[in-house]
Image (cartoon, rainbow, N blue to C red):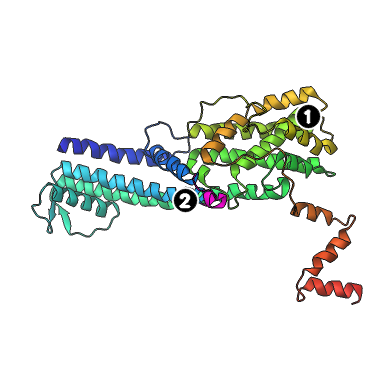
Amino acid sequence: MRLIALVLGIVCCFGVVLDALQTIILPRRPTGRVRLTRFFYILTWRPLVAVAQRVRDHRVREQIYSAYGPVSLLLLLGLWASVLVFGFGCVYFALGTPFSDAVNPHGPFWASARTDLYVSGTTLFTLGLGDVTPVRHMARLLVVIEAGTGLGFVALVIGYLPVLYQAFSRREVSVAMLDGRAGSPPTATELLRRHGHEGGERDLARLLEEWERWSAEILETHISYPILCYYRSQHDNQSWLSGLVAVLDACALLITTIEGPTARQAQLTFAMGRHALVDIGHVFHLEKINETLPPEESETERLPKETFYRLCGELGDMHMRLCGDPAAQQRLTAIRTLYEPHAQVLAEYLKMPLPLWVAEPKKNDAWKKVADLRMGAGAAETLLNAIEHVSDRSTATHLHEEEHGF
């Protein structure tokens, strides 16, 4: 019995230390399927998804998903601490409970086990109460080792949380900025349409260059810290996955339909974005996928015929020969097979919807209203109507009165 407890305790302690090193310290993708962190997310994420899918309210369901990332981090840290306490407690038990306990000097089997767990818990969290003292040299050595392990555990947690949230913050800045450049939720068509102005090619190339770097950061941070994949954006219509796929869609259109410097930068951004998408899928062991697109009549097909015709109409003013060039359409279908299957399995696993190719029409498009205020036709009338809804105490109202001599 004590030999089994010794083996179990050693396995638990070394398993937690190795798992924490791979999860926090090592800047590489964690390897091995027998890992405590992997089992933890398997046993918590899928049951949570099953429960959340029963919730009919979309907002409530998204709130459940958004809470999982931070809460799972706290639960994982608590799991590591609990397994360490249990592991050292098993080692103490295997040594015959070598402690002097005034509360339970000569207790039965379960009383000894409680003493071992109590000593392990107070030692790991460095309480140092002193009510239970070791009576053997080996026990003293183990107490010192466990106390050092507890200090290192606390130091890792203190250093881990800021790094994690800094990476999350950097990721969300680019996702939020995509709102004004590609709509919300973002679409490739809207991204290209909003850069159809004079000089828009330079702005679009600069944006794609920024997202090439963003994809490289995602590749580095989300593989080292896979828990970041579960962290969702502050708005329900935004996500890091939809932003990445929308940019990849735009790159696919640019690569297959135009020539020039923008297409070259689109190739570079596409390569880095696809690399990040595929490698993140490997972290969750989603390698075995069918790298083909669903048929056009399927509900999961992102670009059916009617949507493709709308796409052609939206991009008609940008001189992108898509519908009139069958070869371009074939190239677009071919390039979509390189990333869409990987994006779809990630979206299904993380429950993050993928973006559309063409944005649905909106009654109140804030971006269009701002664009109409560029002193075009009806801009003055729009401004006057807007002032009617401004408070009487507003400075803008008084400026308007002075300007018109009221």
Q: Residue at x 87, y 59 (%)?
A: 379
Tell me the CA gap for discs 1 and 2.
42 Å
Can you give x and y, in whole percent of width and height, for residue 334 in the image? 68, 24
Q: Which mark is residue 70?
A: 2
Q: Is residue 225 visible?
A: no
Query: Is residue 317 left or right of 164 when viewed as pictured?
Result: right
Q: Is residue 60 magenta?
A: yes
Q: Amino acid at mark 1?
A: Thr
Q: Amino acid at mark 2?
A: Pro
Q: Residues within 10 Å of mark 2 (few under 14, many from 20)?
A: some
Determine which residue is flagged by label 1. 257
Which quadrant is home to the N terminus? top left
Circles 1, 2 touching at the beta carbon (< 8 Å): no
Q: Residues within 10 Å of mark 1 (few under 14, many from 20)?
A: some
Q: Secondary structure at mark 2?
A: helix
Can you give x and y, in whole percent of width and height, for residue 208 in the image? 70, 39
Query: Is residue 381 left or right of 336 when viewed as pictured?
Result: right
- The span picked out in magenta is 54-63
Can you give x and y, in whole percent of width and height, for residue 231 in the image? 52, 47
Q: Is residue 140 magenta?
A: no
- Seen in the picture, residue 161 relative to 241 is either above or below; the reply is below
Can you give x and y, in whole percent of width and height, for residue 154 in the image? 37, 52
Q: Residue at x 83, y 36 (%)?
A: 316
Along the line of sight, which residue is nearer the eye, 350 or 15? Answer: 350
Query: Is residue 351 left or right of 188 when viewed as pictured?
Result: left
- Seen in the picture, residue 84 relative to 249 is either above or below; the reply is below
